[in-house]
Amino acid sequence: MKSPIGEVTQDENLETQKASGYMYYIIYSTVNIIITLPIRENFKKTKYLTSDAHYLQSMLRALILNVGFKNKGNEALIASTKDIIWRYIKNVEFLNMGAAKDPDNQIILQPARNPMRSPYPWLYLFECLIIKTLRRCGLQIGVPKKSKLRVLDEIDVVINSGGDQLSGEKTPGSSFLNIIYALLLDKPVVLFAESLGYYKSPINRIVSRYVFQRVKLILVREELSKQYLLGNGVDETKIHVTADPAFILPPAGKSRTEEILRMENISDIPTPIVGINPSGLISKYLNDPTKSEEHYIRSMAHTIDHLVETKGVSVILIPHVYSTKNDDRMAADKILKAVSNRNSVFQICGEYSASELKGIIGLCEIFVGARMHATIAATSLCIPTVGIAYSHKMHGIIGKTLGLEQYIIDIDKLDESILKTTIDAVWSDRTAIREHLKAVMPEVIEKAFKNGYYFSKFIESN
């Protein structure tokens, strides 16, 4: 095909098709919004709890954001969040929304995905703004049936979960946008047991302030997040410090744990056992140019050899994230290849549920964790734990809430010497640390359940 300026390339045709598609979407959404006036009520009124039975007058539909299935910490968090809410409100229907589909089709794809590479999240924002403007003019309209925003308009409350999806260590563009869609559609939003704040980007600081000022209830899982919110002018009356819901997650039973070990061909692993959760994400947070993933792998391998040779332990490498880009098993493979005492080091290779992994962690005498929820699994079982921190959440939860600050290593300070010294200290103090965790854990569990209490009171009052 010829044009006045020569050949039209395939790429140009593709770009033309994309542009036409984007324009069609804008026109389609706008026309559908206008021609369907009025479709239904602007906003479903929130149901109320009965004072005795904690049953709502009718089913409450709650949409949980940031649901995943490859990150077992996320799985632990979501499962425990639902259990905690069900403890206080019996008839709740949960809808799961996340960035990727799951094999069982239990996850609805969130509207905002890859906002830096796709125009669609911004078109959805434009759609929400049109709807909000028309509703303010007194027009009771709904979102078009084919719009991905429809599910947001049909639920009663939005629960933002994910733990650190809105924290400064992330690039929370998609997470913020999905919340903003809900806010523009006049849906009540609850930030449920989050670690928040400490943003490096000025844009994230501005956007977060907009979101934090408008959400109805903020439950944070450590004091550091509350301090950030108060320092940025957020209303203190809607902030409550609780604990991470995953502290209540039950481990798999003994028989299932033993079955997994047989499947992994490590059923006769000698005791005592030191559990190590290596992270496939750790190199992303190494800010020291003199350090690299190889430095992390080498430090972990030499520390493992030190433990085997000086403590006579077996070491088991336990993954907690199985996603393609940062699968913990990839880091475990590299560590295993670098150790000298291969006969005393074992690896969990299969993919298991959060409860099953917690059952395996429960076999350990002490634990070293790079993933937040791997360390929560260990400490909730009163296992002395070393935490490797790449964000304030590790200091806030394991350090301040549990009183184990001296056993946390910041990622930029991580080296072989500090690892050995800290792990040796935990090994020496393991009896006292275990008793300390037994003493503080009842209060932590109670604070985890407080998430459900505050949520139910919020529903009751709206």
Image: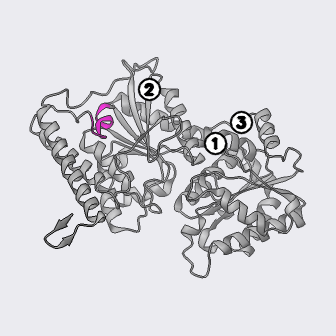
Is disc 2 placed on a helix, strand or loop? strand
Q: Position of residue 460 (x, y in %)?
A: 36, 28
Is disc 1 placed on a helix, strand or loop? helix
Q: CA distance from mark 3 to mark 1?
A: 9 Å
Answer whether residue 13 is visible to the viewer in this image.
yes
The furthest residue to the front? 1
Q: Which mark is residue 92?
A: 2
Q: CA distance from mark 2 to mark 1?
A: 23 Å
25 and 347: which one is in front? Answer: 25
Q: Which residue corresponds to mark 1?
A: 354
Q: Position of residue 195 (x, y in %)?
A: 48, 53
The N terminus lies in which quarter of the figure? bottom left
To which quarter of the image does residue 370 belong? Answer: bottom right
Q: Is residue 150 magenta?
A: yes
Q: Is residue 32 above or below residue 232?
A: above
Q: Which residue corresponds to mark 3?
A: 252
Q: Residues within 10 Å of mark 3 (few under 14, many from 20)?
A: some
Residue type, label 3:
Ala
Magenta stretch, residue numbers: 146-154
